[in-house]
Amino acid sequence: AQSVTQLGSHVSVSEGALVLLRCNYSSSVPPYLFWYVQYPNQGLQLLLKYTSAATLVKGINGFEAEFKKSETSFHLTKPSAHMSDAAEYFCAVSRYSSASKIIFGSGTRLSIRP
Amino acid sequence: EAQVTQNPRYLITVTGKKLTVTCSQNMNHEYMSWYRQDPGLGLRQIYYSMNVEVTDKGDVPEGYKVSRKEKRNFPLILESPSPNQTSLYFCASKVGLLAGGTTDTQYFGPGTRLTVL
């Protein structure tokens, strides 16, 4: 069975500071991993995905994530937070790229302080 | 513009009154799915469809029905809504296996906020 754990339901950082959102996964087979962002009153939008190519994945809006198999982690980072980054972020895992099922984490709400 | 649309966006209803939430996509995607989002639980899959007339249960299918008679539409039906179905619902679509697509990008609709009294 696959699962995803997001550590911290709410993270607050100052504008210009490093953003680090944590995600750990559990999977008995090589996983495909995703980060989605949800802006207020909108649907989810794909930020980036790991599909067994490069372990460091770059996404949109300056975000990136590193797949670490030894730590079963896929943390999301951004060097310098912007006010427009305030949103809810979801980590997700699936078994293979065209899988019918994708398992979402419980989400982390990111707030940016001026 | 490529998009997934849902209607209605907001709905308040009463227990037991049948309702349908529509979902439509204009990207010719084979795969469509319904999720519900609840605080602290993330998104949970209700039903999904790999293609026309092919549907299957997700993680929380109880109390819901779906149909896929056309490729572009995937309505979610609540035959007898109950208060525990009060939630935010999202429809999503993506290119499926038959199209040779390996992309994992799911396109989400804007959501339907349902309140069952």
Image (tube, coloured by chain):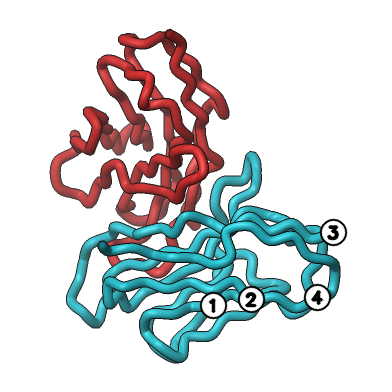
Chain colours: A red, B cyan
- Image spot of residue A69 (x, y percent): 30, 38
**Quarter of the figure with the C terminus of chain A:** top left
Q: Look at the numbered disc 3 and give the secondary structure of its residue.
A: loop
- Crowdedness near tag 3: few (<14), some (14–19) or many (≥20) residues, C-alpha within 10 Å: some
- Total labels: the figure holds 4
Mark 4 highlights which residue?
A: B17
Q: Look at the numbered disc 4 and give the secondary structure of its residue.
A: loop
Mark 2 highlights which residue?
A: B20
Q: Look at the numbered disc 2 and give the secondary structure of its residue.
A: strand
State the separation of the CA atoms marked 2 and 1.
7 Å
- In terms of sequence position, does the residue under pointer 2 or pointer 1 come before the other? 2
State the separation of the CA atoms marked 4 and 2.
10 Å
Task: Name the disc covering residue A69, or none.
Answer: none
- Crowdedness near tag 1: few (<14), some (14–19) or many (≥20) residues, C-alpha within 10 Å: many
Task: Name the disc covering residue B117, or none.
Answer: 3
Proximity of marks 2 and 1: CB atoms separated by less than 8 Å: yes
